Amino acid sequence: DAGITQSPRHKVTETGTPVTLRCHQTENHRYMYWYRQDPGHGLRLIHYSYGVKDTDKGEVSDGYSVSRSKTEDFLLTLESATSSQTSVYFCASRPLAGVNEQFFGPGTRLTVL
Amino acid sequence: AQSVTQLGSHVSVSEGALVLLRCNYSSSVPPYLFWYVQYPNQGLQLLLKYTTGATLVKGINGFEAEFKKSETSFHLTKPSAHMSDAAEYFCAVSDGAGNMLTFGGGTRLMVKP
């Protein structure tokens, strides 16, 4: 399995506070992704990155921003958390070519009170 | 645009019985198709994938899926369920380059003793 870690694994915060989730991969993968998982919706793409400093929006990007200053790190920021952003967040990565599937991290459970 | 529909958010089978999880997709380009499994409190793990070639794809843990273009389906099967198969299963479709995945809503498989 690809070495993908996420931190923190669990976080409880209050409405209106900023939150940053970190994804770290040791596989030198070109692409990285942030998803949120909610019951009945499967996983929905928030943002993705196709290289250092190259990012783009996904299906549910409102209220989220991302940054990628190094190949191995992809940060997801909630500038002002809302209760609707309570979810489980997954990071994934994949190499540039030759392998189609994405490799997933263990997830971060975020609760916004 | 791509989409995935998984029929049945919950499926219950007896141990030793056939497992059939249904997935239908829509895609404007020849699809790459995936099945992922998620065990409780874990990330997603690839079960199997279809890219090109043989339409019957074998994966890990005795699972297989058949790509049927005429039916736009990619159903997942296993001849004999085991208690350890209890998990949530996600079908996903990607574009031809494999960069973006669209997930179905997931099917939770329960296995009764």
Image (cartoon, coloured by chain):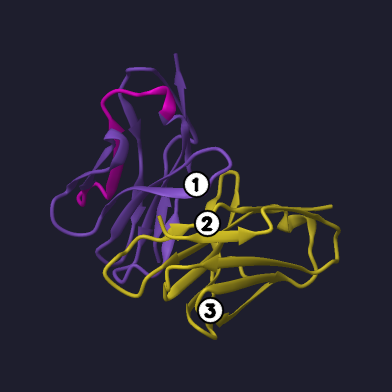
Chain colours: A yellow, B purple
Q: Which mark is residue A105?
A: 2
In 3D space, how far apart are the residues under numbered discs 2 and 1 (Cα atoms)?
19 Å
The residue positioned 24% from the left and 64% from the top of the image is B30
In 3D space, how far apart are the residues under numbered discs 2 and 3 (Cα atoms)?
20 Å
What residue type is disc 1 on? Answer: Gly
The residue positioned 55% from the left and 38% from the top of the image is B40
Quadrant of the frame with the N terminus of chain A: bottom left
Left or right, residue A58 beside residue B34: right
Q: Is disc 2 placed on a helix, strand or loop? A: loop
* Disc 3: which residue: A56
Q: B45 or B72: nearer the eye?
A: B45
Labels 2 and 3 in the same subunit: yes
Residue B27 lies, in percent from the top left, at 33, 61
Identify the magenta region. Answer: B68-84
Residue B49 lies, in percent from the top left, at 28, 52
What residue type is disc 3 on? Answer: Asp
Q: Which mark is residue B105?
A: 1
Visible residue check, residue A53? yes
